[in-house]
Image (cartoon, rainbow, N blue to C red):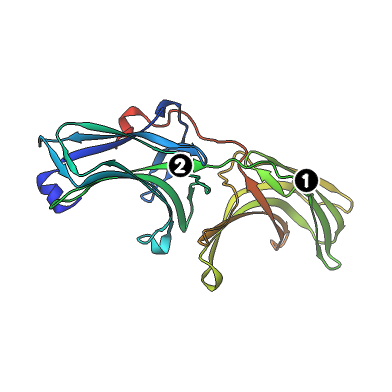
Amino acid sequence: KSLMSFLWGEAATVDIEFNDEKKLKQVSFENEAGKVEHLYLFPGDAPVAGKVHVKLKKKKKLEHLGVKIELLGHIELLYDRGNPYEMIQLVKELDPAGEITSNKSYTFEFGNCPKNYETYNGHNVRLRYFLRVKITRHMAYDIVKTLDFAVQNVMPDPEINNSIKMEVGIEDCLHIEFEYNKCKYHLEDVVVGKIFFLLVRIKIKYMEIVIIRRESTGSGPNTYSESENIAKFEIMDGAPVRGESIPIRLFLAPYNLTPTMKNVHNKFTVKYYLNLVLVDEEDRRYFKQQEIILRRKRISGKKSLISAESKGK
């Protein structure tokens, strides 16, 4: 807060309220301070509407140069957090210049505003949507209030969804084939597959599948990638024999996955991989990665994560 507002106190408080909050779903996100925040959730094509409440403090009136509300979509890179990329900026004027003499409420609606990308909180990049109310004042500090909200987008089932078939081999030592039933999955899907051992001359201790999320920021020579193991799933313990077939059933729903996000405004990409890992008795690791495309089949989130007390913080 500014020194002026500290000395004199804010002339008014501003609260933002969405329409039908009790019916809205919410999702939880970890903010920059490491605290879990509960955000109201909107489908990407849904209007964002509600009310702005201005509550006067000790003064009987508030002179201003205008009251406006903005809907903003920002991409914030960790190394450049103070300079966000603005992908959406919509403005509604709520009140022309004048004075507010008693507590006042304004209605707002951002109807036709496609929010094409999902809210994303990564290691090095954040995609966020928020509302910002600003009361502009003459010879005094502006009064500003922001409120973040979350966005999810449902994608249709793909028309073509080929299976994945690959071979892994070390000459004269190991030759396996593995097959996944498809290459595109929704976030609550099941990866079904098989692994065939055609040649086994090394002593394999165990085998696992790892789901990897790879987040890339920047572009061209300035691209920085960071990989994270989301889940490990052991599919075999002990040595296989030639001709053996190992089934795979990997449920995606328990894991904290997002849809694949490709080249969002040339700022970042999020990809997912299935990494098949074999470990021999000397702890040497043999692996093969395969990208899978993830999509959202339905809007997730839960009801009543936000209590009435915490809503207006």
- Give yes or no for contact between labels 2 and 1 (Cβ–Cβ under 8 Å): no
Q: Which residue is mark 2?
A: 150
Q: Give left or right: position of 158 versus 260.
A: right
In the foreground, 131 or 285: 131
The nearer-to-camera label among 2 and 1 is: 2
Q: Nearer the viewer, residue 135 or 291?
A: 135
Q: How many marks?
A: 2
Name which residue lies at 77% across and 56% down: 204
Note whether 100 is above or below 288 in the view shown: above
Pointer 2 or 1: first along the chain: 2
- Using residue 174 as the reference point, say whether residue 306 is left or right of it: left
User: How far apart are labels 2 and 1 at the CA level?
Assistant: 32 Å
> At which x and y percent is residue 86?
42, 56
Q: Amino acid at mark 1?
A: Asn
Residue positioned 53% across, 48% down in the render: 116
Residue 10 appears in view: no
Rendered residue at 14%/40% (across/down): 62
Q: Secondary structure at mark 2?
A: strand
Q: Locate the C terminus and report the quarter of the image it occupies.
A: top left
| Rendered position, 113 above or below 102 | below
Kindly identify which residue carries mark 1.
Answer: 181
